[in-house]
Image: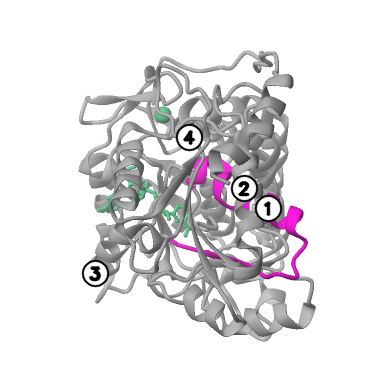
Amino acid sequence: MSHTEQTTPALSFGKAWDYAPAPETTPVPLKKSYDLFIGGNFVKPKTGKTFWSINPATGKRLARIAQAGEADVNLAVKTARHAYDNVWSRMPAAERGKYLFRIARMIQEKSRELAILESMDGGKPIKESRDIDLPLVAAHFFHYAGWADKLEYAFPGRKPKPLGVAGQVIPWNFPLLMAAWKIAPALACGNTVVLKPAETTSITAMHLAEIFQDAGLPEGVVNIVTGAGDVGAALVNHPDVDKVAFTGSTEVGKKIAAAVAGTKKKLTLELGGKAANIVFEDAPIDQAVEGIINGIYFNQGHVCCAGSRLLVQEGIHDEVIRKLTDRIQTLRVGDPLDKNTDIGAINSREQLDRICELVDSGVAEGAELVQSSCDLPGDGYWFRPTFFTGVTPSHRIAREEIFGPVLSVMTFRTPEEAVERANNTCYGLSAGIWTDKGSKIFKLANQLKAGVIWANTFNQFDPTSPFGGYQESGFGREGGRHGLAAYVKL
Ligand code: NAP
Ligand code: MG
């Protein structure tokens, strides 16, 4: 039976269950333009220039964003240094903790409007920004607020000291969450911050800056400079930055590692991934199928730890493919602000082009394409939930990070072969194991070269749990007690 024949029942099921639109109606305080945040104030960039942030679900302009230049970065670093020397590093740790607790509570209070802004600017479905991103953002601030006055318990017998000024550069896939992962531990440990958000998703960082103002955070403790890659480069290369924290592509990560080498700057890199999601014959198949769906289609697949390589044991391959083929037909793709949407818009035209190019390479190299037949909105940037069967380890779609809703399916016969195939990558960020047998989980988890390994689940995040990679996925850990180590001298 062909895949098209098999999907017929699911299609008719989908039609019988048409959903009425359920758009989010809470008004949002979107501004016409956003300035830089330096020294506790919103200031115009010295360049006099701005750029547009686009709503990727419509392709329309949302707001103007200030374009920082080198002089703005210099001022932000100088301001952060002043705040470090004179205020933040001298403040009793319990007082620092109080600010972080206050910020966490204010994020909770404003979480609905922040979630809407995150979905408008970045394209992610409101049910994810509302139920996953924002609760985790607040949880990270709460978690590190608690650590602020307990650092000596985190490092028993040592006297942890702050590093100074942290220059932090983040990507567009989880804008507020990445800001929280960076800012919360830095402040808890007594450092001050200059943050550079991604060009396509700067808006929510500026609303977070308003929360810092409202929380009375001392001026200059957090500074935010917006702009393109050159602003990130100016920040990480600035001689008065003590710590560089970067999340983004492996390509840019390598440039930053080279630039920081030979300086006294401390560095953490959270880079790309190509995670194996391994499903054994004895796994609970229906749960595994849901885990595969969540693993690759969560946040349109714009997830560094996405389960983008599915390794299925041969005996259940056909059954898993049949179920996946049916399941992708029921995923609702469309308006990110509709509460029923499962898959929102692709973050930018550039990212959509990258996904299309890699998908074309998969077809050209001989893998078999399976795609949802759903309608896509007319404007904006969209991609249907997609997977490839018949993928071989040499295909580009098996090796390169697609960073979109595209899964590559391969098979294995034995656990040894599963490990070998899973580890056959330059990355090493995450992996998933699906099996009924606990001993198999422990054995495999020890053999897989990945920083985070999920068993019978996928894409679970918690502020108490360290996250980070091996090899070309970077180094250093964020989250939990481990995350503190990146921001202290011992
Ligand atoms: P990217 O191009 O590397 O950009 C990341 C950030 O770096 C952006 O703010 C970017 O600014 C800035 N940047 C660009 N060139 C720079 C340079 N030469 N020096 C300093 N900063 C520079 O990555 P992306 O395309 O935004 O994000 C997707 C990638 O991030 C994926 O590969 C993904 O796997 C990875 N990622 C990893 C994790 C993790 O925790 N391991 C989490 C999320 C994403 P612009 O926005 O202006 O380009
Ligand atoms: Mg945008």
Q: Pointer 4: residues within 10 angstroms few (<14), some, or many (20+)?
A: many
Choose top left, top right, bottom left or bottom right for residue 105.
top right
Sooner in the amino-acid sequence: mark 4 or mark 2: 2
Q: At 37% across and 17% down in the image, what residue appears?
A: 61
Q: Over which residues does the magenta segment extend?
A: 273-302
**Distance between the Cα atoms at labels 3 and 4?**
38 Å
Mark 2 near mark 1, Cβ–Cβ under 8 Å? Answer: yes
Residue 139 in the image: state x and y as whole percent. Answer: 70, 49
User: Circle 4 sits on which residue?
Assistant: 384
Judge by depth and name the residue closer to the eye, 123 or 333: 333
**Distance between the Cα atoms at labels 3 and 1?**
41 Å
Q: Is residue 328 visible?
A: no
User: Circle 1 sits on which residue?
Assistant: 289
**Distance between the Cα atoms at labels 4 and 2?**
14 Å
Judge by depth and name the residue closer to the eye, 9 or 218: 9
User: Circle 3 sits on which residue?
Assistant: 258
